[in-house]
Amino acid sequence: MSRKILVTGGAGYIGSHIVRQLGEYGYDVVVYDNCSTGIPQAVLYGELIIGDLSDINRLYQVFGKHQFDAVVHLAARLVVPESVAYPLDYYSNNTCNTINLLHCCNVMGVDKLIFSSTAAVYGESNQNFVTEDAPTSPINPYGRSKLMSELIIQDYARASTLRYVILRYFNVGGADPVGRIGQNSRATHLIANACNAALKRQSELKIFGTDFPTPDGTGIRDYVHVEDVATAHIDGLRYLEDGGNSEVVNCGYGEGYSVRQVVERVKAKAISGVDFPVINGDRRDGDPASVTASIQKIKKMLSWQPKYNNLDAIISSALAWEKRKLK
Ligand code: UFG
């Protein structure tokens, strides 16, 4: 019998890539998503239930109807500046709703969880390549809402049979290599914004801060292809199915690129070949200067083998997706 997996947030950007891969690997998938940012057409496998994680009665019904082997929990708000403006939304959606889900796992005996966390839990790390045991000191409500969820999951796991893999994503970008799914919600992220500038859907690209303590003064991030991020979830599930212990692992490539470097690649002849205006702007609230992953642990623990470890591949697939959305 195939294993049944609940994916919360499975109609969203990263979730829909995970659902597609789970389907391709023969898992039976149920998606629970309120479709506030996700879209039903992005769910290419399994059953979609439109519902909110705050509705715990509905959630119990879903758990009662299906016998889940594991839960992959992504449903969350994820825009850093929005979290600064609306912190309570972030704590309700990200932290309180995680507790609802854990209650259901507890009552219905689901003992495997993959949790979508973020590099934002580290805040301003002084390590060049931040390891999972680096101090967690998030500098915005988004990061704090995710860190609190991590701690709650860990406390609950200590008191139960739950085993988990917490994946701390770095900067996820790119789209399905054959263009079926990609980022649909309002773009706020650098690669999507720069692609939109190249496609003349926005007049310019604004750089948020040019006075960071980095070589060119702009923020440095570790960009990771969404396909490889999705694969990390499959690897995490297999690890737990094989009896692996609970772990927290980074998911990035261990390579940092500045905003200017990303913009230069978007403009490059081989990618868009479009020279759009770039404006130097003020720093955005809650943005750290530089965040790059140490990725020894995910490779060792989950045997994760990324296939798209290349900034140009991430940007090209994101650009192709944005072009497709224009049609
Ligand atoms: N940036 C710009 N102009 C833009 C958009 C972004 O200069 O139009 C800059 C940001 O200031 C930052 C970098 O580009 O320096 C990346 O910004 P993103 O908005 O693309 O992503 P964030 O780093 O803010 O956040 C993302 C995810 C988080 C995750 C974090 C981890 O949204 O979930 O990466 O580093 F926690």
Image (cartoon, rainbow, N blue to C red):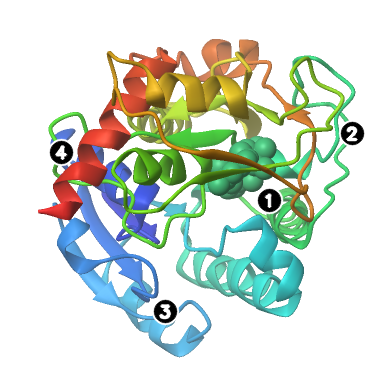
Give the CA separation, mark 1 to mark 3: 20 Å
Give the CA separation, mark 1 to mark 2: 21 Å
* Disc with the residue nearer the chain's start (2 vs 3): 3
* Disc with the residue nearer the chain's start (1 vs 2): 2
Camera-nearest label, 1 or 4: 4
Res 69 visible: no
Judge from the rendering whether residue 302 lies leftward or rightward of residue 246; answer left or right.
left
Q: Residue at 36% across / 46% down in the picture? A: 196
Camera-nearest label, 1 or 2: 2
Considering only vertical position in the picture, is 30 above or below 129? below
- State the residue in front, 266 or 17: 266
Mark 1: which amino acid?
Ala
Disc on res. 179: 4
* Disc with the residue nearer the chain's start (4 vs 2): 2
Mark 4: which amino acid?
Gly
* Disc with the residue nearer the chain's start (1 vs 4): 1
Give the CA separation, mark 4 to mark 3: 32 Å
- Quadrant in which ligand 1 is drawn: top right
> According to the image, label 2 marks what residue?
135
Q: Residues within 10 Å of mark 4 (few under 14, many from 20)?
A: some
Q: Residues within 10 Å of mark 2 (few under 14, many from 20)?
A: some
Give the CA separation, mark 4 to mark 2: 38 Å
Judge from the rendering whether residue 208 lies leftward or rightward of residue 108; answer left or right.
right
Mark 3: which amino acid?
Leu
Across and down, in percent, residue 239 comes to: 46, 27
Considering only vertical position in the picture, is 62 above or below 242? below
The reply to whether the residue tagged 1 has its Cβ within 8 angstroms of ligand 1 is: no
> According to the image, label 1 marks what residue?
157
Mark 2: which amino acid?
Pro
> According to the image, label 3 marks what residue?
59
- State the residue in front, 157 or 175: 175
